[in-house]
Image: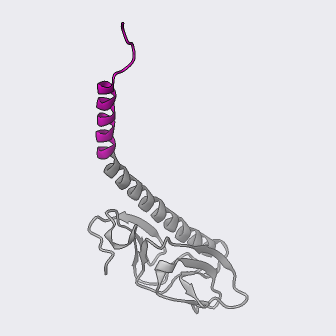
Amino acid sequence: MKHSGAGIIEMLVVVAITSILIATITPSLSKIIEYSKATSEIARLYQSLQYARSLSKSYRSRITVCPLQSGSCSADWNSGFSIFNDKNNNGVFDSGEILVLKIAIDAKDFLSFPKTKISFNDLGQAGFSNGTMRFCSQKLNSEYPQQLVIATSGRIKRQDDKNLNCDD
């Protein structure tokens, strides 16, 4: 009598080969996911800063980007940041000023900037010497650190830097 189905030996071989393939692909897949998350997050931060700069030029008004805590700019960029119309350039979200956008940062990620605020004037200029915003996905041990360099002119440039240390 002939059997036309697969035997147990054939099925075990298929399961073994599939297990080996999954075991070799999984670490690569997690790195791809981390890289994708890091690049999409830095793109979102870049777009937010470009939006703030564009608003400042469009409305001929000072637009401030900073992590707001109790209405004032703070140094804790990890908590996210807000974009608002800072008419008097005092780094405080006063009554009568408009909150344009609030950006959240994932609690597992790391974001830092050496200043408490980025304030674009009516010409879109940042008004300080160059500053570098550093971003690391999954806190300090990211394999894909990213940075945004904000020039005095207000121009924002994205850079990948494998040597970037988010621990500073």
Q: Is residue 55 or residue 42 the one in the foreground?
A: 42
Place of residue 148 in the rendered image (x, y in percent of width and height, measured from the top left) = 42, 70
Q: Is residue 143 or residue 83 the one in the foreground?
A: 143
Compared to residue 18, the image places residue 95 above or below, namely below
Q: Is residue 127 or residue 93 the one in the foreground?
A: 93
Q: Is residue 93 left or right of residue 9?
A: right
Compared to residue 7, the image places residue 12 above or below, namely below
Q: Residue at x 34, y 49 (%)?
A: 26
Q: Residue at x 29, y 74 (%)?
A: 165
Residue 54 is a magenta residue: no
Q: Is residue 123 or residue 16 the one in the foreground?
A: 16
Total numbered badges shown on the rendered structure? 0
Place of residue 80 in the rendered image (x, y in percent of width and height, measured from the top left) = 52, 77
- Answer whether residue 131 is visible to the viewer in this image: yes
Compared to residue 125, the image places residue 93 above or below, namely below
The residue most toward the right is 96
Quarter of the figure that contains the C terminus: bottom left
- Answer whether residue 150 is visible to the viewer in this image: no
Q: Is residue 34 left or right of residue 162?
A: right
Q: Which of the 4 image quadrants contains residue 55? A: bottom right
Query: What coloring was used for the rendering?
Result: one colour
The magenta region covers: 1-24
Quarter of the figure that contains the N terminus: top left
Place of residue 91 in the rendered image (x, y in percent of width and height, measured from the top left) = 57, 90
Q: Residue at x 32, y 40 (%)?
A: 19
Residue 2 is a magenta residue: yes
Place of residue 11 in the rendered image (x, y in percent of width and height, measured from the top left) = 34, 28
Q: Residue at x 51, y 79 (%)?
A: 79
Compared to residue 85, the image places residue 91 above or below, namely below
Q: How would you classify the magenta stretch by its main secondary structure? A: helix
